[in-house]
Image: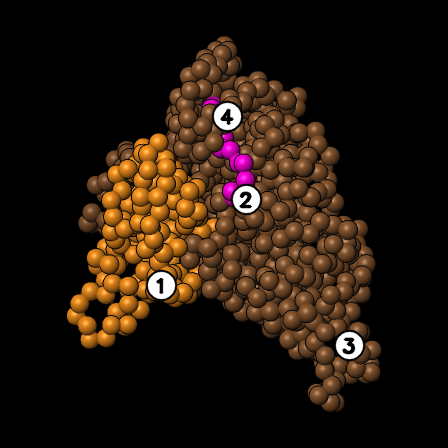
Chain colours: A brown, B orange
Amino acid sequence: MSAPGGIPKAIEQALATHRRGFLKSAGMLAVSFAAQSAGWVNEAAAQSAAPAAGPYPDPDFRQLDSWIVIHENNTATFYVGKTDLGQGTGTGFRQLMCDELDIAFEQTACIMGSTDITVDQGGSGGSTAMERDAWPMRRAAAEARRVLVDLAATRLGAPADQLAVSNAVVSVKSDATKRVTYGELIAGKKFNVTLTGANVNAVTGEAKVKPVQQHKYTGQSPQRDDIPAKVDGSLKWAVDVKLPGMVHARNVKPPFVGAKLTGIDEASVKSLPGFVKVMSKGNYVAVVFEREEQAVRAAKQLKTTWEKPASRPFPPSENLFEYMRAATPTSATNPVVVGNPEAAFAGAAKVVEAEYEIPYQGHTSFAGAHATADPSNGQMTIYSNDMKSYSMRTCVAQFLGMPRDKVRVVWMQGPQAYGRTAAEDAGCEAAWIAKELGRPVRMQWMRDEESAWDTKGPAFVVKLRGGLDAEGRVVAYDYSARSCDYNHVGYNEPDTVLIAQLMGARRARPAAGSSSLPSEMYEIPNRRMKGEVVSLPLVWETPLRTGNLRDPNGPQTTFASESFIDELAAAAKADPLEFRMRLLTAGKGDDAGFKRARSIAALKAAAEAYGWTARSSPKARDRGNILTGRGIACSFRGQTVAAQIAEVEVNRETGHVWAKRLVCAHDCGLVVNPVSLRRTVECAMLHSLSRALYEEVQFDGEKVTSVDWVSHPTLRHADTPAAIEVVLVNGDPNPGRPDLPPYGAGETACKPLLAAIANAIYDATGVRLRRVPFRDARVLAAMKG
Amino acid sequence: MSSVTLRVNGRSHTVDVDPATPLLYILRNDLDLHGPKFGCGLGQCGACTVLINGAAMRSCILPVSSVKGEITTLEGLAQNGKLHPLQQAWIEEQVPQCGFCQNGQILTAKALLDKTPHPTDAQIREAMNNTLCRCMTYYRVQAAIQRASKTLADAAPGSGTEVVA
């Protein structure tokens, strides 16, 4: 069994011993860093760390020693500034670095995301782990190999080009008995090699990375190193941190959005066992108790009085789209215009128009925001699952007015992040209370609080218009989107984090938000595309604040654009796949041509895996109670393409939709770990299936009413498709190129699925659903209407 | 406050707490058993699942004073350092994403297989339906249950009796 954090015990012990000495020599504090950074804190470690801890200067990304430590027993530890949200990026980084360093995968460990011991690569976000952030890791590993081979050349008395490396052992090619291990060459010492590069992404040494064909682990599927500790119960998560003298905090949120706190009756909880304090500033209120269940009870029992706002903070959710259509935009992108759309519409044989509506959808994480803050020794340590631990560090420092080097964030595993923890709330709350009390504080949000007050994916209204010529070709296209995204919160900002809003310590104006254009690659000669942002009446201190939900606008815009392409295909009485193919021409050598070539390859691969036969939609309705249909959709995120086909069963009597089979052809360039990638794609598709069928944040005029798993339904076991097939495609025009890059893979598969389901429902029933989600009652009403 | 004795993973523990305290907080904060998690506090999601006399129960809504019997948490599933076939199947299928719900998935599956060693797909869907996962690992959870069911059956060749691991 592996140790907590998934690190083999032997490596962890070696690491603890070595790192202690190494950090001491570097003038840094050294206490149980290995254990902490592996995502594991125990009481003893924390206790011993506290008195001498800090300050915490930034690890220097231009020092090779910041990235790689080689131990005496010929194992290595990699230190990277990323966080793994459960998609296996940590394992992937190890594979790539092992290949460049020439060391056995089993002899390595990867430490991630703790601000004092790993360089700032920003944590996670935007599916950039492999696409952008693995590059400096690979280059650092390649440089470490170069340095070690040079050391071996001196030691073995042979020129570097006469040496071979295998599994961290360097030997003379002509005499394999002459050999030395990496451990013997470097252990106990530092590399002391300075790297170059304007920023962390550009970091490089003298060595070049290997052609991908020479990689041994890349493209294989070693098991994810975090999984054993997640199934045997040994992993210590951020929620598990327990410190001496720690107290428990719970928030008390305003009962009405936009309300002003007018009174707190502290006596209502003061006599409860374990009372520590009621904390309050502005409209922020929290109770602090010795034990967790005491805090939970007191948060419900605390008597507070609030003054309702003079005007409604937002319309009730059933009127949201009406409100959005009537609102004056707060910002708009300049329209993208190609050709002459108006003239083309005027000359079109047929014009199709449709409008699509996507409500607010929450992250609705499986568990509430949480963090533990330790103010010992005038420093501040936050134990957190924040996917962007580095910006949380800066945020907490600025929010508390502490020097940045007195604050560190120790990243640990947590529930489903997907953007929620890029704008994390509990870290600042725990830190503020801890600083005020002078005691370690564990903060956790409750279910209703998280469902109501987490950051939301923005609601969208998208109007589309398309013109077909007499032969059914698309000659004109007009896309006009409105997102309700004016108060989009940034990454862990001290003046937009919720506690700052509630305390009134917020910036003057919120961020502008965005309203994206579709990203598929159809060649339509006359196009006009624009996006506008609108705002709800209340922009601050509101649970309807937007944030990055797993490709912030992608599922919404793609639902509209890929549903509409299907509507055009139906109007042209064309097969939906053929219709798309006609709009794609490979070649031209530019980025668009490159993307089109890969779109074609992905669509073909999906169709082949599915067994697609050409016909137009809808099909003739089945006679029985169950109507079956198929739908296709395709999209890009960055340089990754996903083409998906859904087969659905629609119950004519209940309106219930079951996605019986899902196929995804996925091209993200170089595949580092096929099994991890397949799992990520499977789950991303089901996440979007949940958004397609169930998810909507509902609210009345004064509060969010989706507050638990009854009022906010989610996908369940019974909804699981009978079959999910993921086809990994390499549609690069030069598929064997030695520099084939990996592109991002976390989010693309989320994009096309809503449209694929809607298109399949249309194929089955002849009914076009333009409003998400497709809950039973809506589908039934649409079929009857 | 009152003194409560619990049998957990084969050991006895006595704690001095408010008897109304949900079992979950005792397990996590007093006994340092972190397999069970707080997900909703409402008995809706399954993150807090423990086995009590073999039945899957939601410890977040179970007053500690009402608990009678032997409690098994995720930490207690492995025997003599050997993972339970379900845990092994979870690794082989590479089931978890974030993994936060998997305590509930694994223990609910354990209760299912103890009663129904060879479940059909429909039985798995029904038995697991109230155990939620927001990373949506359902497809692989179901595959892992089938895999573990087969492992357990193979471990008892020719046996017509139920296999209880």
Question: Which numbered disc, 1 or 4, marks the residue closer to the eye?
Answer: 4
Q: Main secondary structure of the magenta part?
A: loop
> Do the dots labelled 2 and 4 sit on one chain?
yes
At numbered mark 2, what does the secondary structure look like: helix, strand or loop? loop
Chain designation of label 1: B
Above or below A296: residue A141? below
Q: Is there a contact, CB below 8 Å, between mark 4 and mark 3?
A: no
* Residue pointed to by mark 3: A152
Which of the 4 image quarters holds residue B46?
A: top left
Q: Is there a contact, CB below 8 Å, between mark 2 and mark 4?
A: no
Q: Is residue A136 visible?
A: no
> Do the dots labelled 3 and 1 sit on one chain?
no
Chain part drawn in magenta:
A241-253
Q: Is there a contact, CB below 8 Å, between mark 1 and mark 4?
A: no
- Ranked by sequence position, the earlier of labels 3 and 2 is 3
At numbered mark 1, what does the secondary structure look like: helix, strand or loop? loop
Above or below A196: residue A776? above
At numbered mark 4, what does the secondary structure look like: helix, strand or loop? strand
Q: Is residue B94 left or right of residue B66?
A: right
Residue at horizontal 33 percent and vertical 50 percent from the top: B12
Name the amino acid, label 2: Asn
* Residue pointed to by mark 1: B79
Which of the 4 image quarters holds residue A377?
A: top right
* Residue pointed to by mark 4: A276
Residue at horizontal 23 percent and vertical 65 percent from the top: B163
Q: Position of residue A409 (x, y in %)?
A: 63, 42
Chain designation of label 2: A
Cα–Cα gap, marks 2 and 4: 26 Å
> Do the dots labelled 1 and 2 sit on one chain?
no
Q: Is residue A38 visible?
A: yes
Residue at horizontal 54 percent and vertical 64 percent from the top: A8
